[in-house]
Image (spheres, grey):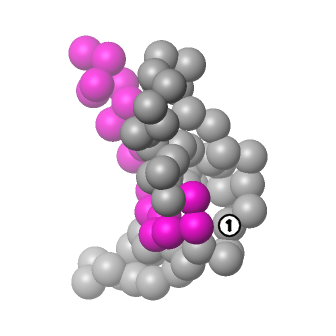
Amino acid sequence: MSKSSAGREYAVEPTQIDLGWRKSSRSNANGDCVEVAPAGGLVAVRDSTDPTGPRLAFPATAWRSFVDGLRG
């Protein structure tokens, strides 16, 4: 993982994570979705149309706050 200026680890090399990726059951058939996977205390996120491309990782608590905010 590479570190941001604040010292937090967010960028994940594509070869570092081989996880059980999943996407929302509400996603449509065109495939333009994000996929997420648990990675220790992190949640990894990638573009479903580019599964070998860049991935991000967020602390699980930050991801939960983000999702809760989306749900309102």
The quadrant where residue 32 appears: top left
Q: Which residues make up the magenta segment?
A: 51-72
Give how far across and how far down residue 12 sits, in percent.
Answer: 52, 73
Which residue type carries mark 1? Ile
Image spot of residue 72 (x, y percent): 25, 15
Residue 21 x/y as whole percent = 66, 45
How many labels, in total? 1
Q: At 36% from the left edge and 25% from the top edge, which residue is drawn? A: 68
- Residue sitting at 68 percent across and 66 percent down? 17
Is the residue 37 above or below the residue 40 in the image? Answer: above
Residue closer to the observer: 59 or 29: 29
For label 1, the residue is: 17
Q: Secondary structure at mark 1?
A: loop
Asked if residue 62 shows in the view, the reply is yes
Q: Which residue is depicted at the point 63% across and 37% down?
A: 22
User: Residue 31: horizontal and vertical position, in percent?
Assistant: 48, 36
Res 61 visible: no
43 within the magenta span: no
Q: 69 above or below 58?
A: above
Is disc 1 surrounded by few (<14), some (14 to 19) or many (20+) residues within 10 Å? Answer: some
When asked about the image quadrant of residue 13, the answer is bottom right
66 falls in the magenta region: yes
Q: Residue at x 56, y 19 (%)?
A: 25
